[in-house]
Structure formats: C-alpha cells, structure tokens
Amino acid sequence: MRFRSARRSKRQTTERQPAVAEPVCVTVARMGAQGDGIAEGPRGRLYIPCTVPGDYVRARPTTKRADGYAADLVELLSPGPERAEPPCRHFGDCGGCRLQHLNDDAYVRWKHERLTIALTRAGIHDYTMDPLARTPPRARRRAVFSAIRPALPSTPPLLGFKCRESHEIVDLADCPVLHPHITAILPRLRDLLADLLSPRQSLSVSVTLLATGLDIVLEWPNDPDLTTRERLAKFTETADVARLSWRWSAASTPEPIAQRRAASIEFGGVLVPFPPDGFLQASADGEEALVNAVRDAICRGPSPKTKVADLFAGAGTFTLPLANVGIGVHAIDSDCKAVSALSIASRAFPHVTSVQRDLFARPLTPGELSIFQAIVFDPPRAGARTQAEQIAQSSVPLVIAVSCNPDTFARDARILASGGYTLKRITPIDQFLWSPHLELAALFRR
Ligand SMILES: C[S@@+](CC[C@H](N)C(=O)[O-])C[C@H]1O[C@@H](n2cnc3c(N)ncnc32)[C@H](O)[C@@H]1O
C-alpha cells in the first residue's frame, strides 16, 4: 500500500514542530471532526492524521492540544479494516485532502456522523436525514494555489496547495478533486510564473472555472509594470483564459489586466457577470443539489404567490433559479459587486429585488421579515447567529438554511428551534470531496 505520511511526518517533526515525547504504539479508536484518527496514548489522547479506526501505528506526539496531543504518524504497523488506497499521489503531503485513506462506506458514514453529532450536541433530534448527495471527483471548480520561485534561479517555480499545517508547497502534478480545465492550466501557469517571479518570490493564484472559461486572480504585492502586463495579456490569449486580474492582497479589489471574453456564470439559465473575487459554490454538482433542495422546499410550500427573502444571496445562486419559476425574491448580500451583478442579471425579472446590507450588523428584523412566506439563508462559515435570532422571533412559516459548516449550522438551528421552528429535513451534500467539510440544506417549519 502506498503510504507517504510517515515520510512527511519525519520532515515535519525535524523541521517544524519538535516532538514533545518519544514515539508510542497505539491503536486508533475513532475519527475526530477534522478527519484525524483518535487514539489513547500513555500520556493522553493523540490526534493522528491519515489514520483510520483499527490502525495500529507508531505515532510521535508533537504539540499539546486542549485534551491531548497532535501527533505525527511515524509508521503504520497494521492497517484497520476501513483503510483504502488514496487515489492521489500527493495524499499525505498535500493539505487539501484529509480523508482519501478511508474506504467509501466508512467515508459516507463519517460525513453523516459529523452532522448528527453536531445536531445532537445542539439538542436537535427527530428529523429526516437524506442520503449524502455525492459530487464526483474532478468536479471542483475553484481553487487557490500558492506558488514560489526557489532560491536557485534555474529551478522552476513550485505551484500547488500548501502542505498540511505548513507553508511548504506541494508542486501539484495532478489533482483528483479539481476540474480537468483547472489542472490543465497548471503547466502554463508554471511557465508564466517562471517569467514573473524572481528567486524566493511567492504569490497566490485563484482559479475559478466559469461558464465562459477560466477566471484567474494573481495576488502579488508588486504593481505589474508595462512589460509584465503585456506578458500577462499574452498568457491570457495563448492559454485562452476568460479573464486575468491582479491584486495587492486578499483585502484589495482585483484589477482586471486582460479579458478575452465576458466572465460569466449561469444561475437558473441566466448569465450573470461574475465579479473577479466573487463567491461561487465549489462545484456545479454541489450547486445543483443545493438549488434543487431549496427550490423543491419552496415550490412545495404553502402558497403559489410565495415571496422569498434570499439572505446572503451572493450573485444569485438561489435567487435566479427561484425567479425563473415565477417566485418573487428579495436578495440581500453585503458584497456590493455581487449585488450589482445580480441586479444586472435579474433585469428581466420584475419580481426580483436586490440590496446591499450587512446582515451581521443589521439583520432583517421580524417586522421586515413578516412580508415573506419563506427565507433562504446561506451565511459564510461563521454562520449567522444575529440573523438567526431575528428569524427565530419572526412568523415566517418556512426557513431553508444552507451551510458549509455543521457546527455553526447546529448553533443557528438551536436558535431557530428555541424560537419554535422544527427541523424537518436535512440534505448533506459532499461538495468538499475528501475534506472534513460538509455542505447542507435544511428545511425548518413553524
Ligand atoms: C456562502 S456564501 C453564499 C452566497 C450565495 N448564497 C451562493 O450560494 O452563491 C456567503 C455570502 O454571504 C455574504 N456575506 C458575508 N458576510 C455578510 C454580511 N455581514 N452580511 C451580508 N452578507 C454577507 C458573502 O458576500 C457571500 O456572498
């Protein structure tokens, strides 16, 4: 069995984190919420990446954690029954995936348990849980890569994901998670970066696959001069990239440098002009599963004249498919570029309105919510505590929560339940393949 973690662990132990104890031999008992195997060691609990229940391993404790130690896997002595061959040659080195070493049944069970445990902790029981909606390999349509030019000028740049808990970069040759259009651009990007970067310089590259092609944002603290801009424009043309932008830092607005065609995405059959750093669900399959769950819940709802509040609407992932079947939608998001993209795209729908508003600072109040028959809310990973508190006091009969974080979702679900809502149905969606993350759509009724 191919297994690389032990090699990486040795490097991490000597280069990054001094061991706090000699290696110990333990049997992994279960999987934790971050996808690490958990074992009881002589000095406390150990969290060991790349292990599965039943693995008998030699592990080296590294850093103290609240209730035990993070540990590196030194040697797999005897594999547990749920172990599988990882499909990716970078697994164990790359920080992108944590669960490729679990067989499929155990993987699906773990994702379900991740959700049930979070809900049980929040005191929520008695709901219908749909089977895990799967997204296939090679379907992820957005990625943020890191790149560095090594000190030796003749060495080509490294381009890929960061190693787990490290700033080192895995020079990505292939990736079974990413859409092939994204992996296919990596060699060309490497050539481009070999021209752009001086030794030891680094940058980050966001790549998003839109309906009209690739949208690339280079994040780099050097204002590109004329020669660089010409080089970037040439790259955009020869690599047939839809748009290439540059920005100083994650906090600054990307400046488009070259554009071969409109950078657009399609929501509900409507083309939306996509902002350079806009939010897009991680895969088209995941988006479809979410849209189906939201639309089915609302179309089965109490009134044909339903008016929906789409909170944290982005550029209209749910707004436009709902509008397309005649449902009136009021969309709200704090990102002015997303709101403006949606308002341009929804011109043909008089029953759609969109506004910019910070829903953390100024959540919609029960009075404002009273004109709606349904609410869709899809906040960032931190969840929407203040907005959930307002919804909990409202009289809206139907609420659909979309979330990429079972823990913050469970907290917000508790708030809704305390206000009299009942969780009826939940659809887990495996949008983040082989990672500990989980997307979901949940239906609450009053
Ligand atoms: C998970 S995304 C969902 C977007 C959209 N529903 C979709 O599926 O494409 C979360 C959205 O919340 C927005 N957001 C973040 N903080 C916000 C805030 N304080 N108030 C309103 N919207 C916010 C982001 O701009 C982003 O569009």
Image (spheres, grey):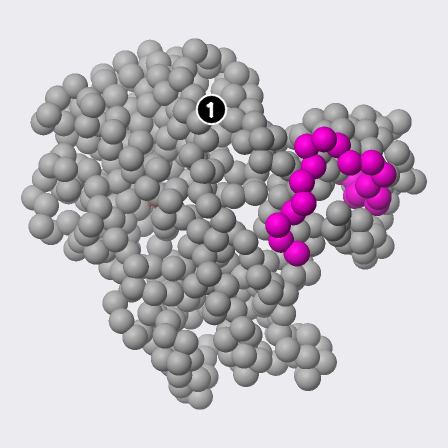
The residue shown at (62%, 53%) is 88
In this figure, what is the number of numbered marks? Answer: 1
Q: Residue furthest bottom?
A: 227
Left or right of 9 on screen, residue 187: left
Does the magenta-highlighted stretch encompass residue 71?
A: yes
- What x and y, as percent, mark residue 118? 53, 23
- Res 422 quadrant in image: top left
* Relative depth, front residue between 277 and 8: 8
Report x, y in % for residue 185.
47, 69
Q: Residues within 10 Å of mark 1 (few under 14, many from 20)?
A: many
In front of the other: 182 or 309: 182
Q: Quadrant of residue 387?
A: top left
Give the left or right position of residue 355, taking residue 143 as reference: left
Q: Quadrant of residue 171?
A: bottom right
Tell which of 298 and 381 is nearer to you: 298
- Does the image show residue 62? no
Residue 197 image offset from top left, x and y in percent: 57, 78
Element type at mark 1: helix
Amino acid carrying mark 1 in the image: Ala
Q: Residue at x 35, y 37 (%)?
A: 289
Q: Residue at x 25, y 46 (%)?
A: 316
Left or right: residue 177 compared with residue 238: right
Q: Is mark 1 within 8 Å of ligand 1?
A: no
Q: Is residue 324 magenta?
A: no
Residue 149 image point, x, y percent: 63, 75
Magenta part of the chain: 69-90
Q: Is residue 119 above or below residue 164?
A: above
Position of the C terminus, as image quadrant, is top left
The residue identified by callout 1 is: 410
- Image height of 131 relative to 357, above or below: above
The front one of 420 and 290 is 290
